[in-house]
Amino acid sequence: MDLRDEVKSRMEQTHRLAQKYYDSGDIARARVEYIRCAGLAQQMSTISPPGQNPDYTTMSNKYKEIAEGLKENNIKVYTSGIKPAEQVAQTNGNGDSQRDAKKAEQLIMVEKPTTKFSDIAGLDQVKEDIKEAIVYPFKYPDEYRYFGVKPGGGILLYGPPGCGKTTLARAAAGECDVAFINLKVSDIKDKYVGESEKNIRDVFDTARSRGRAIIFFDEIDSLAGERSQSSEGHEKSLVSELLVQMNGLAENKDSVLLVLAATNRPWDVDVALRRAGRFDSTIFIPNPDFPARKNLFEISLNAKPLSPTVNLDALAKETNGYASSEIIDICQRAAKIPLRERIKKNQPRRQIDTPDFTVVLAKYHSMLPSWYIHAVNEIKQMSQEDIDLFRELIQASKEYAVNIPK
Ligand SMILES: Nc1ncnc2c1ncn2[C@@H]1O[C@H](COP(=O)(O)OP(=O)(O)OP(=O)(O)O)[C@@H](O)[C@H]1O
Ligand SMILES: [Mg+2]
């Protein structure tokens, strides 16, 4: 380990210790550890190259301010995911109300993505499910009322990485004329302990005030996934607050909210959230099938100079079992071959051709087999009820010749 790694690791350890003391209410010891952190950050700044990110001098000053604040008893400390720079910026004498307003504003980023369902290959059924929850209720309100079908609700998307969960949620918002509240669980948790539940309530209140909205919880597994590292009671109350809000979805008559959540670690999603009835549906987002893969090649190569002799059917066949993001990556890499020839060897421009794909594919290894093995191993350890919930994942894993549970 070189000196920088060593100091950095000591700083991180000291930081964790400081948080632990703070959590346990031992402020005096926490203060001592924060002072140590300041010293170590200062040391980091002297041994790091200039322009280093993060700026350790600033960090050191922040640690000093925290220690000072603890002495004066006028500071609160984040106990999960501490980011000293942000923390001190927020706690540095701006007054509570201003700080709260800023927090809410940062937390609730209402944006309008431009992605559309047509940008997404495959996944037709889930696109339709989303439309039924949030698009059609506004097109056909009388029919929904007549048949007594409640709009909105909750959909949990799960599946292997890079196959379109996040993109799908963004496209849902781009497709429908609704407010889109994109939340990373860490955004909610990075707040003062005890205020996280309030953050969730604020998010739902804001969404309701918009009339119709999609609240997107990306990487929802982290809501419970870090349980072992932080105070368990805190995590529990976060999940319960979310459950309360989810239960209230159907009761609210003036607004239509769709809660979308996504994860590639469904086994880490809190059991209370995962079980049937919390989300109206739990939908598996699989790796792309043949038509979707072909479509991905078309989408990715559309704006590139492609030789007409390249056989997209053959490419789609050869990439069976790959993630969508990997297919996009393969196209990018294939295009770089003639690009490099052109700029480095000054060769004439040429189209991307079959041998370029052959070269790329020969070296390309999909991450999905190892993901499926891991997923099935995790799911194996669950109760039968949960195993049943993930049957589509288990079915899909058979393609990868993974050992199937029970
Ligand atoms: N079905 C798809 N159609 C078109 N593009 C896709 C599709 N799936 C993924 N992509 C592209 O691949 C990239 C990764 O996709 P995305 O972030 O949606 O995956 P994810 O399922 O959310 O993965 P993770 O579980 O790692 O969060 C994005 O840039 C997206 O444009
Ligand atoms: Mg994602």
Image (cartoon, helix red, strand yellow):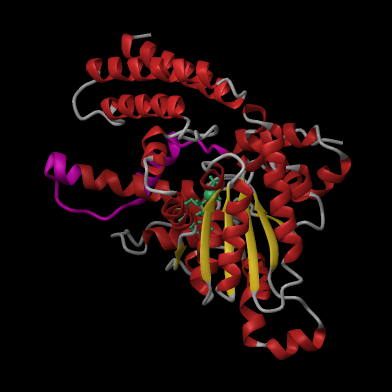
Q: Is residue 277 left or right of residue 238?
A: right
Q: Quadrant of residue 60?
A: top left
Q: Is residue 375 left or right of residue 62?
A: right
Total number of numbered discs in the rendering: 0
Q: Quadrant of the N terminus?
A: top left
In the image, residue 7 sits, relative to residue 382, either above or below, namely: above
Which is more toward the observer, 19 or 138? 19
Q: Is residue 349 magenta?
A: yes
- Residue at figure coordinates x 65%, y 76% from the top left: 255
Q: Residue furthest front?
A: 72
Give the image location of residue 266, x and y in percent.
Answer: 69, 43
Give the image location of residue 71, x and y in percent.
Answer: 44, 24
Which is more toward the observer, 109 or 164? 109
Q: Is residue 323 visible?
A: no
- Residue at figure coordinates x 33%, y 15% from the top left: 39
Magenta residue span: 341-367
Q: Quadrant of residue 145?
A: bottom right
Give the image location of residue 68, x and y in percent.
Answer: 39, 26
In the image, residue 107 sits, relative to residue 51, either above or below, namely: below
Which is more toward the observer, 237 or 295? 237
- Residue at figure coordinates x 14%, y 39% from the top left: 345
In the image, residue 57 sits, relative to residue 339, either above or below, namely: above
In the image, residue 151 sits, relative to residue 31, either above or below, namely: below
Q: Is residue 404 magenta?
A: no
- Residue at figure coordinates x 76%, y 71% from the top left: 251
Q: Is residue 26 left or right of residue 354?
A: right
Give the image location of residue 110, x and y in percent.
Answer: 47, 64
Which is more toward the observer, 216 or 401? 216
Q: Is residue 381 visible?
A: yes
Q: Quadrant of the C terminus?
A: top right
Q: Quadrant of residue 165?
A: bottom right
